[in-house]
Amino acid sequence: MAGRTRRAQRRREALLGYLLVAPALVVFAVFVFYPFAKNFQLAFYQDPLFNLPGKRYVGFDQISDVLSSEDFRHSLWTTIAFALLSVPAGILLGLALAVAAHQKLRGIGIYRTIFASTVASSVAVAAVIFGTLFNPVIGWLPWLGIEPQPPFLQNPDWALPAVALVTIWQSIGLSFIVMSAGLQAIPEEVLEAAELDGARPWRRFWRVTVPLLSPTIFFAVVVGSIFAFQAFAQVEMLTKGGPIDRTNVLTYNIFVTLRESQDEGRAAVLSIALFLVTLLLTLFQMRILEKRVHYAS
Amino acid sequence: MGRVAFDHVTKRFGDVTAVDDLTLDVADQEFLVLVGPSGCGKTTALRMLAGLDDPTSGDIVIGERVVTEVAAIDRDIAMVFQSYALYPHMSVRRNIEFPLRSRKVPADERNELVAEAAAALGLEQLLDRKPAQLSGGQRQRVALARAIVRRPEVFLMDEPLSNLDAKLRVQTRAELVELQRRLATTVVYVTHDQVEAMTMADRMAVMDQGILQQVGPPQEVYAKPANLFVARFIGNPPMNTITGTVFRTDGTLGVQLPGGRVTLPESVAAAVQAHDGDDVVVGVRPEHATLDPEGSIEATVAVVEVLGHEQHVICRLADDTLFTVRQPNDDVPPGLGVGLRIAVDSRRLHVFDPESGRRLEVAPAAPAEPAETTT
């Protein structure tokens, strides 16, 4: 008797549980799980030329085709270069500003707000601001006497760094907030102990602050890399992948393949590649970098 | 020379005065305990000595040098924090050698000093562990080793025993005193625990509300508390303090208390004379009172605490004030609610002015140092 009622009760509880997660599950199913699975399916079908109807099952042919193409390789390297240009700089600048704003000075709150403010702007806003600054006619750089020919965004050597610069600026806010939170979690007494132990500020920073901040830095590197690999808006708004494909990162390549070439299959393969590259990078960071991270017990 | 001095040091945080005109001299190789309730300013005083906080006014002296303007890093002091403040990412060895590496001590000398400090505190087996792998007592010893490794003139300790369990605390208390004797250095030790102050200090400085109340050897502070605050703070169970009225009969002075009278010893009587007819506060330590059918104070038994080695008989006086009598455990504890009489040792009475709280005595507790109460 008692066993049965208890079992019935447990079943009711389980039912209620499923009921409660159902709405979230539906949203995820429609917008995440289904597209994810569908994408894999698309990768096995080749679109006919000239947007004619009639997809054709080609198995792994399309995948190996795309992955061995010069176009893919170029996009991948561009993405990696973009991440290398933007992620470390964004983190270092965020850390530097966080350290500066961590000082107990009068009016420091104003600076904290300013440093964190870029988090409130979107990438698109950043792109518009910098697009204007870089503009060879109305921009500020010519006014400062910096006037490369061709101008930054049309310059094959400078376009990618320029797009990275926009990304750095935009990511500083978040990086600053994350680093500030990390700094605040370091016990004041440990730094005071280091001071009394005769460690000058530079030594305190490298020997105590940085190691204790390592979980935060690690988190910022992983998340920053994922963001960088998925960067799209700044490329779309500033360079559209050009000049001569110099800023054609993977996400942008996927977009162009889908929108302009209407090649669903190829775009699907590129998407899977982006997913796998990001996944591998994150796993790699977890295995290698995490060894150097100190987690407080 | 490990002499340390506060010279009219005041520290304000906004409107709050944490330390108020503190003047205090600590002799070379002395073990001085700053004791007081939380928020009394003792930790702030210690932090100013360390250089972690700047005084609002006044000077700090270490050795023969006024160090008020000298950065913490350049004062020859070491500190043990309440939380130990170990470097969690470094091994025990790295923690202990950190002060030496900071000062660029050559490797062979460094290893020798670390080995010595580790041996002094029994840490040889733990050198490769991380702080997270240590017990509370072991962490505390690492913090001590890190402090002694570079042989500073002055040690500062901020409640170093408060995170240990009761048994370990008693043991470590003795070890710390022994360590201080062996190293022959000056120690300024902060605690809220009056037992630590009583057992460890050469001299103790009692603070309350930022103000130094009394300085002296523990026995002297215990026997002649300078004011009501010290009287109630030092001693466990605390001193009984009862308000009564001074009266005079046949040339002797006494105090009428709720439930009875006490006569005053001569040393006190002379000072109280002028207070004839006024209220005073009479202080009686629980061990200076006995349950005695001939006693002069009537009371009823409220609670009896049997501790094993002694009993605390907590009685209620006529006006509901509680009065504790300490007696040996061999005595038969009285039943609850029983009416009885308390006799007090009148030579050991303390009398305080109820307004100022100050001790009333002809020759007040003589300050051992020029630095004394500043009120």
Image (spheres, coloured by chain):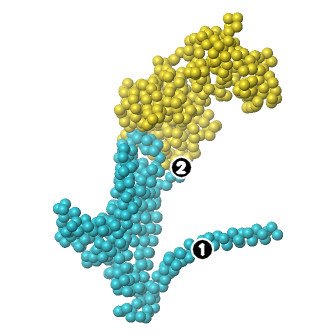
Q: What element carries label 2?
A: helix
**Residue under circle 1?**
A22
Q: Residue at x 53, y 24 (%)?
A: B213
Q: Is residue B194 visible?
A: yes
Residue B52 screen position, x and y as percent: 42, 37
- Mark 2 surroundings: few (<14), some (14-19) or many (≥20) residues within 10 A: some
| The furthest residue to the top | B250
Chain in cyan, by letter, is A
Q: Residue at x 49, y 43 (%)?
A: B85
**Residue under circle 2?**
B132
Colour of chain B, in one word, is: yellow
Q: In which quarter of the image is residue B320?
A: top right
Quadrant position of the N terminus of chain A in the picture: bottom right
B92 is higher (above) or lower (below) than A89: above
In the image, taking residue A215 as reference, residue A237 lies left or right, namely left
Q: Which chain carries label 1?
A: A
| The furthest residue to the front | B277
In the image, taking residue B241 as reference, residue B86 lies left or right, namely left
- The one nearer the camera, B365 or B154, is B365
- On residue B169, which mark appears? none
In the image, taking residue B188 as reference, residue A174 lies left or right, namely left
Residue B312 screen position, x and y as percent: 73, 28
- The one nearer the camera, A8 or B149, is A8
Q: Which chain carries label 2?
A: B
Q: In which quarter of the image is residue A263?
A: bottom left
- Mark 1 surroundings: few (<14), some (14-19) or many (≥20) residues within 10 A: few
Mark 2 is on which residue type?
Answer: Ala
Residue depth check, mark 1 versus mark 2: number of the one nearer the observer: 1
Residue A178 screen position, x and y as percent: 43, 57
Q: What element carries label 1?
A: helix
For the residues labelled 1 and 2, the Cα–Cα distance comes to 42 Å
B33 is higher (above) or lower (below) than A116: above
